[in-house]
Amino acid sequence: MERLGRGRTAEVYRTEDDKALKLYHADVSESFITYETQIAKAVTSVCSAAPKFYGKTTLEGRKGLLYQIVEGTTLTEMIHQESVDINGLACRMAKAHQSIHATSTDDLPSMMDYFVPNLIRYGQLSDAGLQNLIAFIDRDKTEKICHGDLHPENVMEDNNGKLWIIDWTNAYSGNPISDLARTLYLFLNGLPLNQTHIEPAERLMREQVVESFIPFYGSDDPRKSNDWDVWRLIILINRCFENIDSERPEIDRMIAEILKSRPEFA
């Protein structure tokens, strides 16, 4: 089989019948594989932008999942092309994100399941601030599919020009504004592996993507919502547990800034 890539938890191969086999490393727990299986089943049953899921398999004692193979170019690669149409790409990505948020399912983790454990682990909020933040999440009953990690590397254009959204491991059911807060953070501040800072030219490009993305997503700018900074706070705290040491100083600065303006969560 042809190996297509290797990540922290698995290798991806092309099977003889042209499927993508995500073959887990030996140290990956059965519970994690079961969790990703449930996510894949839930998402692909309702979201046309997600590659089809064909089920679990085993190869030479290693557990794996079979997906529809998507061949093409990531938006990360497209954004860095010389003659790139930033507005056009941002528009297409915004519409893809919007289409995800128009769907729902009962089979994904709730926001309480997804966010609260890390809020508790964070340990730098007062008891009152933590409880206010948990209550903020608990009273929001919105249940739309949220990707949880949508950024240009997880969007691919296939050879027919269709956009596909990949890597659904972080999907949950909740308020799309929380998902937008995560996406905008990654657009502006996310650092790929082995990158420690953002050069000025890249910073300008990232800002242009965001300013194009927002109006294409919807008529209202979510950043003007009273709840925007609260969702940002939740997203930033959860980001602290993703082994992103290079981002941590800026995350800490942004958290402190939000808590200064929203002391009820401090």
Image: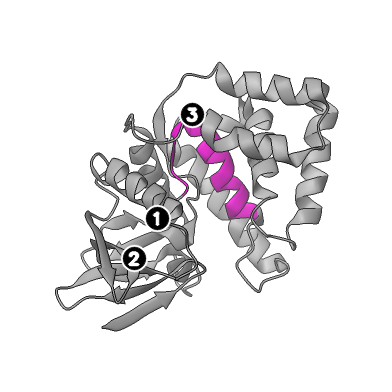
| Dot 2 crowding, Cα within 10 Å, few <14, some 14–19, many 20+ | many
* Span shown in magenta: 170-188
Nearer to me, 160 or 204: 160
Q: Is residue 83 magenta?
A: no
Q: Quadrant of the N terminus?
A: bottom left
Residue most toward the left? 17
Name the mark nearer the viewer: 3 or 2. 2
Callout 3, which amino acid?
A: Asn
Label 2 element class = strand
Callout 1, which amino acid?
A: Ile
Callout 2, which amino acid?
A: Lys
Side of 178 relative to 47 (left or right): right
| Dot 3 crowding, Cα within 10 Å, few <14, some 14–19, many 20+ | many
Q: Are marks 1 and 2 in contact (CB under 8 Å)?
A: yes
Expressed as whole percent of the image width and height from the top left, the position of residue 251 reads 75, 49
Q: CA distance from mark 3 to mark 2?
A: 33 Å
Nearer to me, 149 or 20: 20
**Residue drawn at x 61%, y 70% as measured from the top left:** 193
Q: Is residue 87 among what the camera can see?
A: yes
Q: Is residue 51 above or below residue 122?
A: below
